[in-house]
Image (cartoon, rainbow, N blue to C red):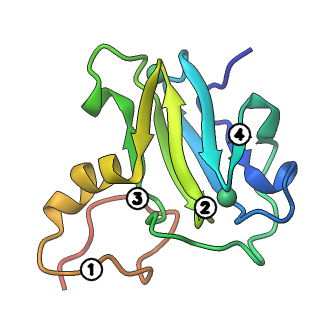
């Protein structure tokens, strides 16, 4: 059993006391192993039909609506793509195809284009796309 496109993993499903990381699978995932957050392993057992309440989730350094794309880092991978939807204070890494996708890989991918400013949670979660130029 593996995850597939459209699956939503909610850390709260099995760990109510966690930061409440929610990620959505955008593609790939044949080699998916787990998401590590707050010391928990999130697997296909944490797939939910829909995201639970956003109340009490703790955001970390992980920007919302950012997509971790395994293929950009590892061209020969299954091409797992995961979008962060909420929470993430305790996020550590995503394991797939024996690779490790971490926050630093997100920063390399996404923040390189955002010069001269710190990422702020004032965007529009749920609407991934090019940031508007202020
Ligand atoms: Zn967590
Ligand atoms: Zn993979």
- Of tags 4 and 2, the one toward the viewer is 2
**What residue is pinned by disc 4?**
42
**What residue is pinned by disc 3?**
128
Q: Give SS at disc 3.
A: loop
Q: Identify the residue at image location x=52%, y=31%.
A: 95
Q: Is mark 1 in CB contact (under 8 Å) with mark 4?
A: no
Viewport quadrant of the N terminus:
top right
- Of tags 4 and 3, the one toward the viewer is 4
Q: CA distance from mark 1 to mark 4?
A: 29 Å
Q: Is mark 3 in CB contact (under 8 Å) with mark 1?
A: no
- Of tags 2 and 1, the one toward the viewer is 2
Q: Is mark 4 in CB contact (under 8 Å) with mark 3?
A: no
Depicted 57 relative to depicted 21: above or below: below
Q: Give SS at disc 4.
A: strand
Q: CA distance from mark 2 to mark 3?
A: 22 Å
Q: Identify the residue at image location x=71%, y=72%.
A: 57
Mark 1 Cβ and ligand 1 under 8 Å apart = no
Q: Identify the residue at image location x=83%, y=65%.
A: 17
**What residue is pinned by disc 1?**
118
The image shows residue 77 at horizontal and vertical percentages of 37, 17
- Of tags 2 and 3, the one toward the viewer is 2
Depicted 64 relative to depicted 95: above or below: below
Q: Is mark 2 in CB contact (under 8 Å) with mark 3?
A: no
Q: CA distance from mark 4 to mark 3?
A: 23 Å
**What residue is pinned by disc 2?**
90
Q: CA distance from mark 2 to mark 1?
A: 20 Å
Q: Give SS at disc 1.
A: loop
């Amino acid at each position: 059993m593996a995850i597939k496109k459209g699956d939503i993993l909610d850390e709260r499903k099995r760990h109510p006391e966690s930061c409440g990381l929610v990620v959505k699978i955008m593609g790939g995932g044949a080699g998916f192993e787990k998401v590590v957050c707050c010391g928990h392993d999130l697997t296909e057992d944490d797939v939910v039909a829909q995201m639970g309440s956003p109340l009490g989730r703790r955001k970390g350094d992980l920007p919302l609506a950012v997509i971790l794309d395994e293929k950009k880092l590892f061209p020969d991978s299954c091409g797992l793509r995961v979008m962060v939807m909420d929470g993430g204070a305790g996020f550590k890494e995503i394991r797939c195809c024996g690779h490790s996708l971490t926050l630093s890989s997100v920063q390399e991918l996404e923040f390189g284009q955002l010069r001269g400013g710190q990422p702020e949670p004032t965007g529009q979660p749920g609407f991934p796309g090019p940031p508007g130029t202020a």
